[in-house]
Image: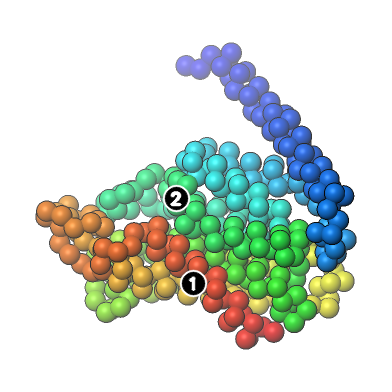
Amino acid sequence: MISPGSRRDSRHSRVLMPVLLSACAIPISMLFWIVNVAYLILWPDATANSTEEHSVISPWRWLASVVIPLMFLLWGLRKKSIDISGAILGFFIGFILTLSSFVHLAALMAFFVTGSKVTKFRSARKRKFEADFKEGGQRNWIQVLCNVGMAMQLAILYLLDIGSGERPIDFDKEYRSSWLSVGLIGVFACCNGDTWASEIGTVMGTGDPFLITTKRKVPRGTNGGVSWIGLLCSTVGGLVIGLFCYITILNTVDTAVLQLAAPQWPIVVVGAFAGLFGSILDSILGATLQYSGVDEKGIIVERPGKGIKYICGKQILDNHSVNLLSTIGVALILPRIANIFWP
């Protein structure tokens, strides 16, 4: 039985948490702003080519860049979607993305929230055929880096080249910012599409998946194994990222700028394509450069050994390497494809 004192302590801790967060976040964000202003005063030539809108980042942007990632960090730890190491790196990545553009933050939020939800979908069934199954996913820093590290690099380039702020996707008038934003959105669409395909596609349906390179039937959980429902899930996963970004663009970019820019709705289609394309690229790499075998209990493993029956692939890459290469490939290819069909 829980004592009244324990319940009061729990209520007090919930009340004090926002106060503690504000006490830490506000001075940190103000410090960033002061450093930004001091830099511009001491070295004005460094920003001679920047527009006034992006030369000084407002204190509110600094504050949001600290508070919002911190809130998601705490939520992820409570839901066991991420461990301590992943939370620390995730906070840093979230800080960079929020500072660069709220559109980039929207892509991160959509991936983190929906990816965490689908990871828990029919978890009892996944435990039967996944050797490294973890309840809730619990991504560590390596998984975070290999999934969204490329997005962080693109956000840093965005800050250095464009500045801090939201821009519409328009390859004619805003080529550099559009290229970087589409590449970044493609990274999250790729990751979300692969997550949705892996977490939902593997536990839905009755038939076994087929190897993407040979179309041979393979056990569920095999690297490179795909199903039609899995490919559909990857498309929907990418579409969700594009939809979140589309809504954010409409609500954060200045209306006058949007009226002169190209239509923004194609970003939803671009996200869906990136989810499907990224999942296919991930599956091809997994089927060829990642070892898959099945042990005597029917669990898929990534290393050969006694009692392991070979299925496909070579022991060159692991799952983290495959995810990293897939996101890099999508980030580099997607802006070019988008520019062809969406000038």
Cβ–Cβ below 8 Å for labels 2 and 1? no
Percent across and percent down for residue 94 are: 62, 50
At 11% from the left edge and 55% from the top edge, which residue is drawn?
307
**Real-space Cα distance between discs 2 and 1?**
19 Å
Residue 137 in sight here: yes
Percent across and percent down for residue 18 are: 70, 32
SS state under label 1: helix
Colour scheme in the image? rainbow
Circle on res. 329: 1
Percent across and percent down for residue 246 are: 68, 68
The image quarter in which residue 239 lies? bottom right
| Residue 35 to residue 181: above or below | above
Give, as a three-letter code, the residue at label 1: Gly
Give, as a three-letter code, the residue at label 2: Ile
Circle on res. 186: none
Q: Residues within 10 Å of mark 1 (few under 14, many from 20)?
A: many
Q: Which residue is mark 2?
A: 142
